[in-house]
Image: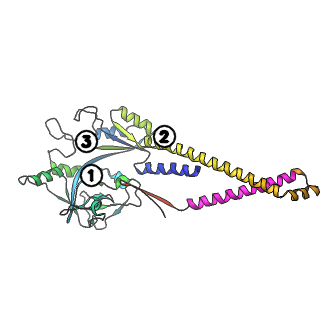
């Protein structure tokens, strides 16, 4: 029972690690009043340098997110999040590389393994969540048409007098390896190089406001980019709370999985105590059963004990003989139980966490 409780606690830690890791701090802009340019401190390159200069901070990853529209043959997907991240972040994502991609310096995309589920048939409007069948979309094949101005596209659809935004052909760098990925957030997003994405957005929108970016009171775009989130990696899990409090004190909103882990471990501790209590009761019942068995054995072997006494055997030796017999029975049962437990534990249990839930199976 105690082993089961420890297993649940370990599994909870794995799930927390799968949602971003234990040494990662997510930073967002803090809004204290009405939504506007004067609320909180913006996540700019200056903030990145500020975080990088803090003690115990190992790496800082700014993330720029923009919704895009994808078109591939008869299928399309709208408002899919495209995340621009530094090259160092991309190198840590396990992917299946696209061998058909041509050499070039342009923006390439890394697709999450569940992005294909977002595609729907353009005529019927049905997709995976309607038919429970994956759309016939090969993201690793020919380049995909990408529209960066999704709102402009729908505006042109509603008003034929409005010119539709331009579509761009972008190749796939690869697809996130589902078997090797430990972060379920990589499943439903698209990733690309941050600097190349910035260049692409400046080329497309020019001085016009970029979707998702803040504007001045006159509706004009800022000359710099404001990141949606910034990930800070701390050198040790012991310093996560310290760095998080420092960032919150600097005027930002920081969160980490440590808080979730602490709550999960408290619940696991309660479950482990209950299971331990059940195990203690079971142990007590087993002890009573063994004692009862040995008492019956003694009563049934009264003649044998009498013969031993007649032969001159000491009462202490007779008592030790029965105690050793009961100890051997308990030891043998314990060895068999431990062997059975190890046999079950070595059946490799695998857990995959997805946005839709948790799937557990045994290989």
Asked if residue 83 is among those painted magenta in the image, a careful observer would answer: no
Q: Can residue 236 be seen in this view?
A: no
Give the structural element (helix, strand or loop) at label 2. helix
- What kind of element bears circle 3? loop
Judge depth for marks 1 and 2 and give the one in front: 1
Residue 105 position in % (x across, y down): 25, 58
State whether residue 226 is above or below residue 32: below
* Coloring basis for residues: rainbow
Return the residue at label 2. 238
How far apart are the alpha carbons under marks 1 and 2? 33 Å
Closer mark to the observer between disc 1 and disc 3: 1
Q: Mark 1 points at which residue?
A: 81
- Earlier sequence position, callout 1 versus callout 2: 1
Residue situated in front as seen by the camera: 336 or 151: 336
User: Cα distance, mark 3 to mark 2?
Assistant: 30 Å
**Contact, mark 1 vs mark 3 (Cβ under 8 Å):** no
Q: Where is residue 261 in the image (x, y as percent from the top left)?
A: 46, 43
Q: Residues within 10 Å of mark 1 (few under 14, many from 20)?
A: some
Using the image as rendered, state which of residue 305 and residue 80 is in the foreground.
305
Is 21 left or right of 321, judged from the image as shown?
Answer: left
Vertical arrangement, residue 70 with respect to residue 232, above or below:
below
Q: Residue drawn 82% across and 58% down? A: 300
The secondary structure that most of the magenta stretch takes on is helix
- What residue range appears in magenta? 316-344
Look at the numbered disc 1 and give the secondary structure of its residue.
strand
Residue 226 is marked as 3
Q: Which of marks 1 and 3 is nearer the N terminus?
A: 1
* Residue 325 counted in the magenta span: yes
Picture coordinates of residue 171 (x, y %)?
25, 62
């Amino acid at each position: 029972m105690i082993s089961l409780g420890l297993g649940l606690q370990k599994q909870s830690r794995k799930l927390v690690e799968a949602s971003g890791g234990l040494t990662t701090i997510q930073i967002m802009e803090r809004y204290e009043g009405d939504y506007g340019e004067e609320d909180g401190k913006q996540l700019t390159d200056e903030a990145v340098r500020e975080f990088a200069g803090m003690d115990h901070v190992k790496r800082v990853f700014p993330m720029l997110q923009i919704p895009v529209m994808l078109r591939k043959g008869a299928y399309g997907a709208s408002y899919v999040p495209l995340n621009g991240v530094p090259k160092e972040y991309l190198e840590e994502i396990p992917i299946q590389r696209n061998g058909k991609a041509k050499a070039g310096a342009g923006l390439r995309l890394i697709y999450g393994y569940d992005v294909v589920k977002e595609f729907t048939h353009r005529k019927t409007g049905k997709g995976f969540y309607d038919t429970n069948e994956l759309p016939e979309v090969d993201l690793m094949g020919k380049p995909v048409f990408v529209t960066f101005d999704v709102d402009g596209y729908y505006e042109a659809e509603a008003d034929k007098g409005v010119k539709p935004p331009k579509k761009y052909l972008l190749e796939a760098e690869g697809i996130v390896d589902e078997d090797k990925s430990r972060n379920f957030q990589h499943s439903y997003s698209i990733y690309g190089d941050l600097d190349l994405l910035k260049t692409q957005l400046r080329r497309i929108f020019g001085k016009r406001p970029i979707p998702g970016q803040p504007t001045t009171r006159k509706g004009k775009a800022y000359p710099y980019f404001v990141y949606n989130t910034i990930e800070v990696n701390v050198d040790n899990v012991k310093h996560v709370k310290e760095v998080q409090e420092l960032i919150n004190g600097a005027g930002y909103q920081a969160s980490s999985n440590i808080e979730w882990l602490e709550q999960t471990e408290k619940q696991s501790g309660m479950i482990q105590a209950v299971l331990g209590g059940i195990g203690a009761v079971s142990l007590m019942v087993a002890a009573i059963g063994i004692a009862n068995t040995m008492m019956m054995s003694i009563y049934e072997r009264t003649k044998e004990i009498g013969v031993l006494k007649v032969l001159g055997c000491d009462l202490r030796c007779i008592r030790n003989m029965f105690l050793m017999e009961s100890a051997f029975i308990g030891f043998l049962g314990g060895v068999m139980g431990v062997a059975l437990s190890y046999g079950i534990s070595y059946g490799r249990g695998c857990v995959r966490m997805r946005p839709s839930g948790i799937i557990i199976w045994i290989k």
